[in-house]
Image (tube, rainbow, N blue to C red):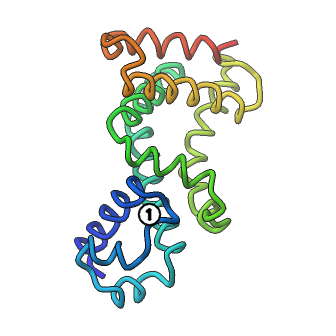
Amino acid sequence: MNEERLDRLFNETLKLISEQGFYSTPMSQIAKKSGISMGSIYNQFENKEILLNELYKKIKIRFANHVLSKINGTESIEQQIKHMLGSIFYYYSEQRSEINFIEQYENSPLITEETQKQLQPYLMRVFQKFEEGKRKKVISQLPTEALIAMSFGAVSSLAKMYVKKIYSSRMPDTISDVIDAVYLMIKG
């Protein structure tokens, strides 16, 4: 399947899953909505679970690359972490269907161990930035997983509140203040 058709398949699958959920979206509906025959889909993906794992990897890699693209290696580790946190806020705010899919999929039994293993190199780059911050003693010496969960969780929760308009409409004007506060939380 060429890249254009694959993108169309992934985009339509994401839309349908966002509207109906994993289990209420049959392959026949994905085929009809994408305009790609069932035979072509099954030729590329053995079953729906494999299709969903590939979609998950594609979105997760795009998210990781977006977050990591905001890092300038010449800046202080503090600035690099703050840039990552800011890019998470904006990605969560702007790519809701992708984020909803990631969150649902990560909490489902459908994600395979192989998929998780294939994503490790992308996740390790974030992990390494926090490890560097710990080595340089600019962030807390708590376990790195805890620091990532605390900071990413806080920023993603704030982004969700912003999207739902629970937070002040001025939030984008003060995002740097919010990021500074989240950083202070992990600074220790």
Residue, x 59% and y 52% (percent of image)? 106
**Residue neighbourhood size for the residue with mark 1, other residues' Cα within 10 Å, grouped as few (<14), some (14–19), many (≥20):** many
Q: Is residue 29 above or below residue 64?
A: below
Residue lying furthest right: 142
Residue, x 35% and y 86% (percent of image)? 38
The residue lying toward the viewer, choosing from 131 and 153, is 153
Residue 57, position as x, y percentages in the image = 49, 60
Q: Is residue 9 above or below residue 68?
A: below
Q: Where is mark 1, residue-wise?
A: 55
Residue, x 58% and y 29% (percent of image)? 153
Task: Name the quadrant containing residue 92.
Answer: top left
Residue 126, position as x, y percentages in the image = 56, 39
- Apparent side of residue 146 relative to residue 168 in the rendered image (left or right): right
Quadrant of the drawing holding the C terminus: top right
The residue lying toward the viewer, choosing from 126 and 57, is 57
Q: Amino acid at mark 1?
A: Leu
